[in-house]
Image: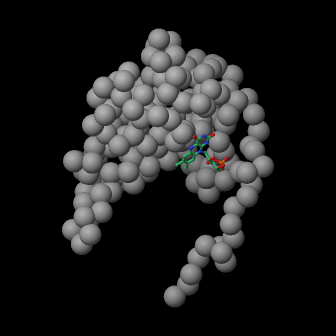
Amino acid sequence: MTDFLQLAHDRYSVRGFDGCDIPEEDINKIIEAGIAAPTGVNFQPIKIWEFRSPEMREKLLACTKMKFIEPAKVIFAVGSDPTKAWKRPFDEKNFGDVDAAIVITHMMLEIHELGYGSTWIGHFDPAALAEIVPETADYSMIGLLPVSGRAMEPSERHAKRKSPEELVTVL
Ligand SMILES: Cc1cc2nc3c(=O)[nH]c(=O)nc-3n(C[C@H](O)[C@H](O)[C@H](O)COP(=O)(O)O)c2cc1C
C-alpha cells in the first residue's frame, strides 16, 4: 500500500528527462489516475490530449518556452470545457479549471509513483495550441504534462514550503 504522505513529499517537478519510452500499460495507469479524480457534481468536464507522435510533439514544443519537455515521449495536455462544468449557484463560479487541476495532480502523482518524472507546464500559449489542435479552443487549457524518466534531483524550490502556522487558521 502506498504511503500517500510520502508520495506527496517525494514528488517534485522534473525539468531534466532521459527520454525513455513509456509502455502503454503505464500510460493507461496515468490516465486512469486522472479519471479517478473528483470533479464538481461528478460532471467530469475534462479532456486529455495525448501527444505521442514526433510530429505532434514537435508542434506542441513550439507552443511553449519550456523546451526541457522535448525528450519526453509522451506529453499530455489537459483542459476543461467551461460549458460542461459545475457552476456554483450563489456566484456562478465555474469550477472547470479546478476540476482539471485535480485531474492533473492525480496524474502527476501517478507519474511519480510509476518512477517517472513530470512538471506541470502552465506556461504555454493556448492560442498556439489551438492552431495545432483546433478542438482545444473550446476548452480552458490548464496544463501540459510531459512524462519521462527523471534525470535531475529536486530543485531548491521544492524544499521551500510554508509552515502550517503560516497557512492554517484554526477557528
Ligand atoms: C499551476 C502550475 C503551473 C506551473 N507551470 C510551470 C511552468 O510553466 N514551468 C515550470 O517549469 N514549472 C511550472 N510549475 C511547477 C512549479 O514551479 C513547481 O510545482 C513549484 O515550484 C514547486 O516545486 P515542486 O513541484 O518541485 O515541489 C507549475 C506548477 C503549477 C501548480
Q: Is residue 94 left or right of residue 15?
A: left
Q: Is residue 26 left or right of residue 137?
A: right
Q: Is residue 64 above or below residue 10?
A: above
Position of residue 5 measured from the top left corner of the image (x, y, whole percent) = 62, 57
Q: Is residue 74 visible?
A: no
Quadrant for residue 123, please give it.
Answer: top right
> Is the image coloured rainbow, by chain, by secondary structure, or in one colour?
one colour
Q: How many marks can you see?
A: 0
Q: Is residue 109 visible?
A: yes
Q: Nearer the viewer, residue 123 or 153?
A: 123
Position of residue 94 measured from the top left corner of the image (x, y, whole percent) = 30, 57
Q: Is residue 41 above or below residue 130?
A: below
Position of residue 42 measured from the top left corner of the image (x, y, whole percent) = 27, 53
Q: Residue at x 27, y 37 (%)?
A: 138
Position of residue 99 measured from the top left corner of the image (x, y, whole percent) = 37, 51
Q: Is residue 56 left or right of residue 157?
A: left
Farthest bottom residue?
171
Q: Residue at x 39, y 54 (%)?
A: 98
Q: Residue at x 70, y 30 (%)?
A: 16
Q: Residue at x 49, y 27 (%)?
A: 63
Q: Nearer the viewer, residue 60 or 13?
A: 60
Q: Nearer the viewer, residue 134 or 153?
A: 134
